[in-house]
Amino acid sequence: MRMKPHVSACRARQAGHQRTKAPRPKHPRAAHPRAAHLLRCAKGKRLRKRLAKRAASRGAASRGAASLSAPTAPSALLPPSQTSTTRELKEINYYPASGGWTYMWTKFDPAEIDTDFGRIRALGANTVRIFIQPLVFGYPAVNPTMAARLSQVIELAAQNSLRVHLTLFDLWSQFTDVTGSKEWVSSLLSPYRGDPRIAVVELKNEVNPQDAQEMAWVQQMLPYLSAVLPGTPRTVSVANIPPLLFQIFTQELADSPPDFWDYHYYGPPQDASTRLTWLKALAAPRPLFVGETGYTTAGTEGNPSAGDEAQAAYYRAIFSATAALELPAPAPWTLNDFAPGAIPPSPTAENQAQYNYGLYTVNGTAKPAAAVVRQGFTSGS
């Protein structure tokens, strides 16, 4: 989930940004077996041209739409520690109920975070995903106060038997400043070199494969993460984009790929199996991880049990789809509902649906989906 000031109607459909207050939120249409149905937006022709050009130059035609139903076995060249780490991920996306996004750090409440981490562990999770914004941490040199708060969060996670998935460069877009980006990464992460408490380092949340400047930055920065944190699995995530655009994304990073691909699924539950089957094929030989998925219970105040049951059914379907495909368990967005005023001023803050994706209400009451997630995390362990 990302906070964005403006999203075009076409991109919103592709990236799953359209949420609604209705009991059953509208989700983007899932992929159709015919490629034409993947390209309903005006950008479709450009996507086809770019895809054909890359396929011709890299000999990648065999990975086109015709190969989507034939996943490839993981490559023996991948480090066993990284592939096993990905398979074992049982992760929850996290912000405190009282402070989302930048407020987690500027209204820092370690006691609340500690309580939440205990709740995450009780769900059967082993990893918590947290987001770091250069805007509040200081850039390119990290503010010592914020560095200390990050250190405390990582230690609180460890005390609750959780490892940490660090998502860097949140709410940031200075893609021409590679030098400053590297300085910031080094300043932030050097203390954690070889630290087993760090499960994953993610370069950025939901990058745009169609932004040439952003992708050039990703190509330079992913290898640098390995230099700063050697041995720690690296990734970079994308939103709920269609398979054709995901294929372009993987081809853009063919020369500097992440250790696993991180995809955020908010599509219809009945289409999850088909969509993820195709994405798994396109991701091969590297693992695919559903790093975000979720369903809002907003808009059901008159009948809250209907929204709660719909959310539980949604998680049941997504966990079933990933298990059948032998993918890691999906990562729920998010642990908590947000309290009024807990989301910093933005279009996201004005959308009531964004306040009710939690597995728990603001007062800590578990929704039915929490039991579904707990069962999903523990059934295979």
Image (cartoon, rainbow, N blue to C red):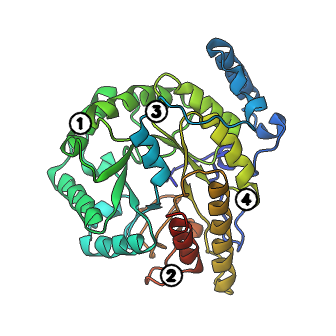
Alpha carbon distance from label 3 to label 2 = 39 Å
Say which of marks 2 and 1 sits in front: 2
Q: What x and y, as percent, mark residue 231?
A: 32, 37
Q: In this picture, is 199 found above or below 106?
A: above
> Do the residues under discs 2 and 1 have CB atoms within 8 angstroms?
no
Q: What x and y, as percent, mark residue 322?
A: 63, 55
Alpha-carbon neighbours of circle 1 within 10 Å: few (<14), some, or many (≥20)? some
Under circle 3, the secondary element is loop
Task: Please name the residue that numbered disc 2 is placed on.
Answer: 366
Residue 177 visible in rendering: no
Say which of marks 4 and 3 sits in front: 3
The numbered dot on residue 186 is: 1
> Do the residues under discs 4 and 3 have CB atoms within 8 angstroms?
no
Amino acid type shown at disc 3: Leu
> Do the residues under discs 3 and 2 have CB atoms within 8 angstroms?
no
Say which of marks 3 and 2 sits in front: 3
Q: Is residue 228 left or right of residue 290?
A: left
Amino acid type shown at disc 1: Ser
Alpha carbon distance from label 3 to label 1 = 25 Å
Front one among 105 and 377: 377
Task: Please name the residue that numbered disc 3 is placed on.
Answer: 78
Q: What x and y, as percent, mark residue 185?
A: 28, 38
Amino acid type shown at disc 4: Pro
Q: In this picture, is 340 found above or below 284?
A: below
Q: Earlier in the sequence, mark 3 or mark 1?
A: 3
Q: Earlier in the sequence, mark 4 or mark 2?
A: 4
Alpha carbon distance from label 4 to label 3 = 32 Å
